[in-house]
Amino acid sequence: MISIFIMYSCDRQEQLSKTIRFLREMEFYSECQKTLVVDGKTNVVPHDFDVIQVSRSAGQFVWADMWHAGVATARFENILYLDSDRLLPTNYLKLVLDHVCDGRFVFTRQHFLMTGAEIEDDDCRFLLESDPKEARCSDIRFLNKLKYDPRHKEPFSGAGKNVMSGNTAFTKKTFLRLGGVDRWYRGHGAYADTDFHMQAGRAGCQFVDLGVNELHCWHPKLLGDQIVTKQKLDQMSLDNFIYYCNKWKLPTTLAENIAHNIGVKKPAAYVEEKVKEYAKGSSKKD
């Protein structure tokens, strides 16, 4: 069977409730282990879920710590990771069981992002159960409410959804063989998932697209009670991407271009200083 772990931040209670409602409609759900992995102290304890509260590192969210907690407590070899804002069709757990195996990550590329407006449950079900090609066509119910944002199947060193972002299934043996997720990445600045995708690709893992639809519920990103501004998110993403480029030996001009686009003064000097800072931190750990 499958150990499901849902990664949850307390600003997403409404989205979590919807995610669990849709999970409960799936075949095999009752036989799965269910764990809620919480960023900090939880504000909800869903029926039939175990809850793990993960402390922040120096006050910062660490995506890797959430993953490691979910995998460490999994009782089954097959594991499904979900963010607390993802809706999937009723046959999803069966598809996972049919395709997951060692050396493989199972996901779906057909990712639709809600743009803010609420979509009723029945309309969500209609879209999830639709043929992926038809789902991309215009429908008055979803006008100005959805953005088609397909996930990258192969490792890609840039912004965008990928196999590891929000929904993927794998075996515990595969995760442990890869050494887990890099704990360096901090905050909501992304690239931890991009890094793990690259890590799995370099290790020869397969990425299997189930070819069904996935709905991503909209929500603001918060730090405490404050909405994280685009400027703050851009800065966190840049700092994480500089580390990513340095780790995977990519040209620093990639990070310099991003720094320029978000308005950093003297982009080359900023990137160079960050690389030196990360090198010092790495040498201290060694």
Image: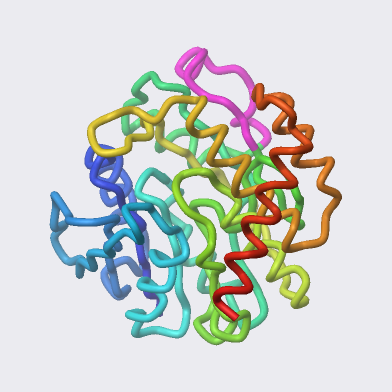
Q: Is residue 253 above or below residue 52?
A: above
137 within the magenta span: yes
Identified at 75% across, 54% down, the residue is: 245
* Quadrant of residue 257 within the rendered picture: top right
- Return the x and y of residue 74 as percentages of the image width and height: 36, 80
Above or below: residue 152 compared with residue 230: below
Query: Quick check: 49 left or right of 262?
Result: left
Which residue is nearer to you in this view: 103 or 200? 200
Residue at image x 18%, y 56%?
A: 41
Quadrant including the C terminus:
bottom right
Viewer-side residue, 56 vs 104: 56
| Count of numbered tags | 0
Q: Position of residue 144 (x, y in %)?
A: 51, 13
In the rendered image, the quadrant that contains the N terminus is: bottom left
Residue 126, above or below 5: above
Left or right? Give the position of 260 relative to 13: right
The residue range painted magenta reads 133-149
Q: Is residue 220 magenta?
A: no
